[in-house]
Image (spheres, rainbow, N blue to C red):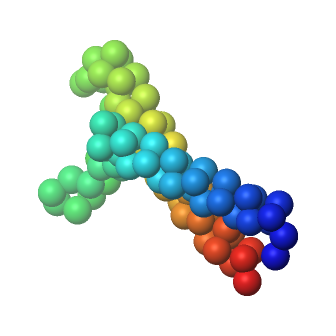
Amino acid sequence: MGEGEEDMSKALNVFGLLLNLAGVVLLFLFGMPFRIAISGKAVTWTTSNIDLEVKKLDDLFSVLGWIGLLAIALGTLLQVWATVERR
């Protein structure tokens, strides 16, 4: 394996770790992007009985939660790619 390939592996690994860290921080700050009620049914918003500002905020938190989950998945894939590429 050449020095360029080793540098690429290290860069992929570090970038994957940074994505994992960012994803975990997003999930801790904004929560999981889905809500399950105690009864086991999915909770849905209805605009007739909730303030639109609260719904917008919940939608923003949901999007940021999904971004966090995707960052963790992508970071893991980059780490796997960096490891497999070495062999």
Looking at the image, which is closer to me, 12 or 45? 12
Q: Is residue 4 above or below residue 71?
A: below
Location of residue 51 in the rendering, given as x and y in whole percent from the top left corner: 28, 17
| Location of residue 23 with respect to 60 vertically, above or below | below
- List x then y, in percent, for residue 11: 67, 54
**Residue 2 position by quadrant:** bottom right
Residue 10 is left or right of residue 30, and the answer is right
User: How many callouts does the rendering have?
Assistant: 0
The residue located at (70%, 64%) in the rendering is 9
Above or below, comparing residue 52 to residue 27 in the picture: above
Q: Residue at x 30, y 49 (%)?
A: 35
Furthest residue toward front? 3
Residue 8, by quadrant, is bottom right
* Up/down of 72 relative to 6, above or below: above
The single residue placed furthest to the left in the displayed view is 38
Left-right relation of 61 to 39:
right
* Residue at the spot 74% in from the left edge and 74% down from the top edge: 85
Is residue 81 shown to the viewer in this render?
Answer: yes
Q: Which residue is depicted at the point 51% across and 48% down? A: 18
Residue 54 vs residue 33, the one in the foreground: 33
Where does the image place residue 19, in percent across and percent down from the top left?
A: 53, 49
* Quarter occupied by residue 83: bottom right
Residue 1 position in % (x across, y down): 81, 76
Q: Is residue 66 visible?
A: no
Q: Would residue 69 appear left or right of 1 to someone viewing this image?
A: left
Q: Of 15 and 43, which appears nearest the observer?
A: 15
Quarter of the image where the C terminus is located: bottom right
Q: Nearer the viewer, residue 56 or 69?
A: 69
